[in-house]
Amino acid sequence: MYEYEFTAMQQLDFAHSWYWFLLGAIVSYFMGCFNFAILISKIKHDDIRHVGSGNPGAMNISRRFGLRYGLLNFLCDGLKGAIPALCGFYIFKDYYFAVGTQYFAVADFARYLFALFALIGHVFPVTMKFRGGKGISTTIGLLWFSVSCEVWWYAFIGLFLFIMLFVYVGFTEWGSMGSLLGVAAFTVWQAVIFTLRYSNMMKNVYVIVTFMILLVLNVLTWGAHHRNLYQLMAGEEHRTSLKKMLKKKKSN
């Protein structure tokens, strides 16, 4: 479950194939630049950037138009991270990098590299003067699918974590903190899998870079919520009431 059969794979030399990773990163970035929250609000004859928190993301869409539209936005933004991750995995799943006698699966690096650039595109889109969403949906989507693409039934564990996120937000009404805890839970889960897989080569450059990408994913997502965290510590965080969102769903 945690090991690869490297004898069935082909060796890939990064020095001679780096341009494929660059191309994948560029395509993923521009995929991330498309903002579904703005599209949904325009369809509703509104502009989500001028209402509520002003954040063009699933949480603000839920507060404005109801939980139904918020979940739709979450799904679309989640796919922006999931699709690059899946492409990275399936394109490179039969290849490995070799550093001496140590082997590292290219798919473990590629899926998170591409997904990272999709997240960067969502948070800093060139199409919106680098002022995008906060990345929760995209990050959860990319982590959820990255873990599940190897073992299909892991998707149900991811679903359980997502439900627990909803339960937490439902009881505490702390939407930002619940979302960030969800991101952290998915990250720790993937980090444990990689630690078990590469426990005898933790100083390998590809292992280190992949863990750094996981860290950067969290830094970007948590950093985008720095104002929410300050407000939460000051007791001024805007409450996220699922009951109110459900009422808006009925009224819409």
Image (spheres, grey):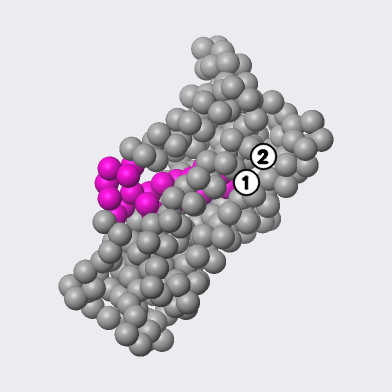
Q: Secondary structure at mark 2?
A: loop
Q: Tag 2: residue type?
A: Asn
The reply to whether residue 244 is in sight is yes
Residue 90 circle label:
none
Please tell me which residue is depicted at 38% across the width and 73% down the height of the picture. 200
The reply, left or right, for residue 174 in relation to residue 197 is right
Labels 2 and 1: the sequence-earlier one: 2
Dot 2 and dot 1 residues touching (CB under 8 Å): yes
Residue 206 in view, yes or no = no
Q: Residue at coordinates 37% horizontally, 84% vertically from top-left?
A: 99
Residue 40 in the image: x percent, y percent? 53, 34
Q: Which residues are magenta?
A: 134-155
Residue 38, x across and y down, in percent: 59, 39
Disc 2 target residue: 55
Q: Amino acid at mark 1?
A: Lys
Q: Nearer the viewer, residue 17 or 157?
A: 157
Residue at 27 percent of width and 43 percent of height: 153
**Residue 122 percent across, percent down from the top left:** 57, 52
